[in-house]
Image (cartoon, rainbow, N blue to C red):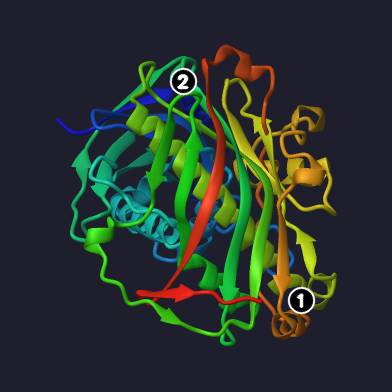
Amino acid sequence: MGRGYIVEDVVEKYLSNLSVPGASCVTGLFIGQSSSQRDFVVLAVRTPQKDTEGQGSPSVSRRAGNSLEHLDVEWVTEHARQVSRMLPGGMSVIGVFLVTPPELSKEAQNTLRRLIFAVDKHISKGRLWSLTEEDVTEKVTLHICSKTRKVVCRTFDVRDPKSSAKPADWKYQSGVCTSWPLLTCSVGLNLVFPVLEMHVLPQDMEKCMKVSGLYWILITCSNPVLFISMAEPQSERRSTASVKVCSGSLTLKGMVQCRAYLHSNKPRAKHATEVIKRDVINTVSSRVEIFLEDLLMEGEDKGSVGVQQGLPRRVFAPVPGMSLCVCDYMFPDECVSDVSDRLKEMLDWETPEDSIDTSQEAVPEAPTIDLKDAVVQKNLKAKFTLDARPKTPSEDPTEAHKSHKTYYAGVAMAAAIALLATGTSLIYLSD
């Protein structure tokens, strides 16, 4: 007997309503939570269309011809990365689906295997935290025949490159996430990233920050205080500290809002701590990534705006028909309609603008990025090119959350950041 999947019945309705004309095929993602015994699927999202030469020719709902060999895997994986940014703690992309005509059914399993490994690899590249032994590495794939509607469910262990397909139990149920507890916390940031002379371009700064991590996160949980260490125990680390002169620094300041869902009505403190900690890391790193991506796209315009610039704020929106929310990151020069448009593009649903909660991160306390380095600022003015990211939307339902049992994790303070470069500890010297 393989893994069991408890699937929200709205997923069944969504999949049955997908329009797959003629010999086309459609790909998409499953979103939910995993546990040691079974997984929970609460959302299905089709891959958005990709314009080709200015025309609305879809990359995934395409004329498949006689083969799935030319399916745009890169586009599917990039969509998965953007969607994963929009998810609160505890939730993740846990699988993929593929709808094909009968003549392509034989190819479907090999294509799904290729997709799920590519999606997991692409998402994992931006992850700043490590998986634990309790994390589930089996991901689900679902093939649907567009004519007969026959469904084949299989899983693959993405940790094992040689993993073969295993059967899985796929069952629909209503109200899967109705009783999921919600954790919330506010995080005060005051993080300093030393910038070496070699880290002068935006893409180099991104690498610099990715090898950095939230070394310690202090979470105050009413009484008592929990101290969560992100580093290896001191006894297991060999000190290779060296002193290097830094050309400047990059500082992140402000308050960020974090949220996480638990699939259990009786959550363990260890699990609750882990999911909220990961959301803290994800939301900070996502903002910086989006900011730097925007710098690369906008080049001169964004890079010449001064030393201190506003990072995108986290906003929340309700999932239609559920007591869950997703999130998006809104730049200071954006409006709610931009968020609504991204929700439609990335998650394939309409969100009324008045249901999008932009109040959680007030503008005066919103995160900012401070570039204190003449060399960096000069280089930021250079023009860089990068394919436009399909921006993602996110919002937060206020009324929908009332049905949840809310666990206030208190006020979390990001206490310190350690810059780890190729295993060498760096001591930052400033005036």
The residue tagged 1 is: 299
Quadrant (top left/top right/bottom left/bottom right) for the C terminus: bottom right
Residue 201 pos. (x, y %):
64, 81
The type of residue carrying mark 2 is Trp
Q: Report helix, strand or loop for mark 2.
A: loop
The residue tagged 2 is: 180
Residue in the image at 36% along x and 50% along y: 103
Viewer-closest of 333 and 27:
333
Judge left or right: residue 36 versus residue 282.
left
CA separation in Å, label 2 and label 1? 43 Å
When the figure is inspected, residue 49 is found, relative to residue 196, above or below; the finding is: above
Viewer-closest of 385 and 196:
196
Q: Which numbered marker is on residue 38?
A: none
Judge left or right: residue 162 versus residue 406.
left
Judge left or right: residue 62 versus residue 278.
right
Judge left or right: residue 218 versus residue 389.
left
Query: Quarter-wise, where is residue 385 in the image?
Result: bottom right
Viewer-closest of 71 and 288:
288
Q: Report helix, strand or loop for mark 1.
A: loop
Within 10 Å of disc 2 (Cα), the crowding (few <14, some 14-19, many 20+) is: many
Mark 2 vs 1, N-terminal side? 2
Residue in the image at 35% along x and 74% along y: 423
